Image: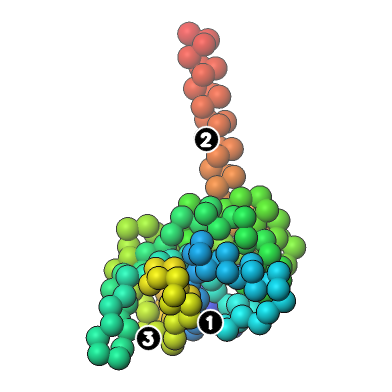
Amino acid sequence: MGRIELHTPLSERDIRGLHIGDTVYISGTIITARDAAHKRIMKFIAEKKKLPFSFKDRVLYHCGPLVRKVEDKWIVLAAGPTTSMRMEPFEDEVIGKLGVRLIIGKGGMGDKTKDAMKRYGAAYGVFTGGAAVLAAERIKRIIRVEWLDLGIPDAVWIFEVKRFGPIIIGIDSHGESLYDKVRTETLNNLSGIFEAFNSQ
């Protein structure tokens, strides 16, 4: 397990070098998208239309930021992660067709996404829930916002960040999942407890 500094755009080599449990800090560009944005992205893909932003070798953050407009400038007040499993129906296509390298969120993702990450060279990182203000402090500026008609939390925000993190790699590009590992260890421990209890 290491502490790794990454700068966007990310390469496949950057991602293949990550393993579950690594601590990562990101500098560069991250792009937010939640459910509504993902549904629109899928529509663009289906209609073969060009998106107004590029995920190629970028970081996708499952986040609905709290922002305020002061005069003509947006300010990020909080930017905590959204539960990632809500995006599970879409994320394998986003990875495979749009080239996302790193997804950040909370709670983990499912087997479809894990398989796509292994196939295409992407990873999933966890940002601590409840640390929304800390996340906002790492956002240096809002580059721009797209699809504001979806509402502020569901719009696509493009942020410039510096040392955004700490992010713990929960699913790597080698098919390993911290969530699967913890689940297996927990079940094994429970099995041991039950066996010890039944032998008394």
Q: State the residue position of label 1.
A: 7
Of residues 158 and 186, the one drawn nearer to the viewer in this rendering: 158
* Distance Cα–Cα, label 3 vs label 1: 16 Å
* Distance Cα–Cα, label 1 vs label 2: 35 Å
Residue at the image position 54 percent from the left and 74 percent from the top: 59
Front tag of 3 and 1? 3
Residue 91 in view here: yes
Residue 82 against residue 121 in the figure, above or below: above
User: Percent position (x, y) of residue 199?
Assistant: 53, 10
- Amino acid at circle 3: Arg
* Distance Cα–Cα, label 2 vs label 3: 42 Å
- Amino acid at circle 2: Thr
In the drawing, what numbered circle is on residue 186? Answer: 2
Crowding at label 2, few (<14), some or many (≥20) Cα neighbours within 10 Å?
Answer: few
Of residues 121 and 186, the one drawn nearer to the viewer in this rendering: 121
Q: State the residue position of label 3.
A: 141
Crowding at label 1, few (<14), some or many (≥20) Cα neighbours within 10 Å?
Answer: some
Front tag of 2 and 3? 3
Callout 1 secondary element: strand
Q: Are marks 2 and 3 in contact (CB under 8 Å)?
A: no
